[in-house]
Structures are given as C-alpha cells and as structure tokens.
C-alpha cells in the first residue's frame, strides 16, 4: 500500500484544535502531516530558533501547497514564514468549518479514528502511542487513517 502526503501541512500549538481540523482532511492512503509548534523558550541560547528550523525543515521536506498555522502565536508564525520559501499560509485561531471548506483536500464529513486504551481489538496494523501526549495522539490518528490501522494508547 502506498501512502502519500496531503497537500496541506498543519503546524499547531493546540492539539485539540489540530484534531478537529485534521479530521476533515483524513483519507485512506493520505497522511495529514501535523507538526507541533515550537515554544518560545531560551531565546538567548538559540533554542527557539533551532526549534523553528526543525519545523521549517519538516515543512520543506513535505512540499505542501498550503501550511495551516493553527493556534500559533504571532512570533512563532512570523519566524516560520520568514524561514520558508514562498508558500501559502493560513493562520487559524479557531475552528471555522466555512473557512476550512474551501481548502484543498477538505472533506465535509470528519473522519474519526477510534482509540483503544486496553488492548487492540482487531487483527490489523496498530499505531501505538503513549497516553498523555495530545499532539502525538493527533499524529497517530492521522497515520492510522492513512494506512487503515487502529490506534492503541499504552500507559506511561
């Protein structure tokens, strides 16, 4: 089975909002890339800048048509924009289905991926993720939707 990257990339500072949005772009054999937004920390030591470089390198490797900056503070969004070649960006601060509906790859009906916390239920592929990391769970759900797998959360 061949999986392709979606035409959008999501950089998000809010896992719950990233889940709501990415659910409308999930499809079989299409992986919706969600990248956790860098945090503004230790600027005097270059940590913030290095975190932004990590995010922009991931975006460059993906080659999306559009980058959604979801719940990213202005300083983070501006730093990411400055580090990338010309590409379309959209700042999203809240869930607005009308705003999303005109974007490439949008699906009217959101695709939810069930998560098992006790044990895997079926004999299918499993995407395992540690419980407690909300952004990792969003990423796991996107991968599971792309490859037809189940998501299994194991305790910390």
Image: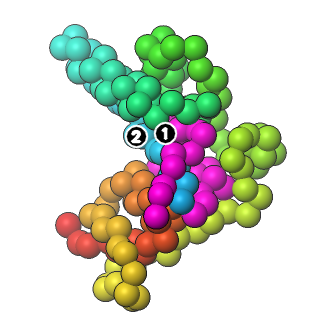
Residue 13 falls within the magenta-colored stretch = yes
Residue for point 52% across, 65% down = 145
Which quarter of the figure has residue 149?
Answer: bottom left
- Confirm or deny contact between disc 1 and disc 2 (CB under 8 A): yes
Look at mark 2 in the image and give the residue it sits on: 36
Residue for point 51% across, 14% down = 85
x%, y% of residue 37?
41, 34
Of residue 147 and residue 59, the one placed in the foreground of this image is: 147
x%, y% of residue 139?
42, 54
Residue for point 51% across, 45% down = 5
Q: Outermost residue toward the front? A: 1
* 109 w.r.t. 103: above or below: below
Image coloring type: rainbow
* 145 w.r.t. 52: above or below: below
Residue 26 falls within the magenta-colored stretch = yes
Q: Which mark is residue 12?
A: 1
Of residue 93 and residue 148, the one placed in the foreground of this image is: 148
Which quarter of the figure has residue 54?
Answer: top left
Task: Look at the image and tell me whether residue 71 can be seen.
Answer: no
Of residue 63 and residue 99, the one placed in the foreground of this image is: 63
Secondary structure, mark 1, is: strand
Residue for point 61% across, 60% down = 27
């Amino acid at each position: 089975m061949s999986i392709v990257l979606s035409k959008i990339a999501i950089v998000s500072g809010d896992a719950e909002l990233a889940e709501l949005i990415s659910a409308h772009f999930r499809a079989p054999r299409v992986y919706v890339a969600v990248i956790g937004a860098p945090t503004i920390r230790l600027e005097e030591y270059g940590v913030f800048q290095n975190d932004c470089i990590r995010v922009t390198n991931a975006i460059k490797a993906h080659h999306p048509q559009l980058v959604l900056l979801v719940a990213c503070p202005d300083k983070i969004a501006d730093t990411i924009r400055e580090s990338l070649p010309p590409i379309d960006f959209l700042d999203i601060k809240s869930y607005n289905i009308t705003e999303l509906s005109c974007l490439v790859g949008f699906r009217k009906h959101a695709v939810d991926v069930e998560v098992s916390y006790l044990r895997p239920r079926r004999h299918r592929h499993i995407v395992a993720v540690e419980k407690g990391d909300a952004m990792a769970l969003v990423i796991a759900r996107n991968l599971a939707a792309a490859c037809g797998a189940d998501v299994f959360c194991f305790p910390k």
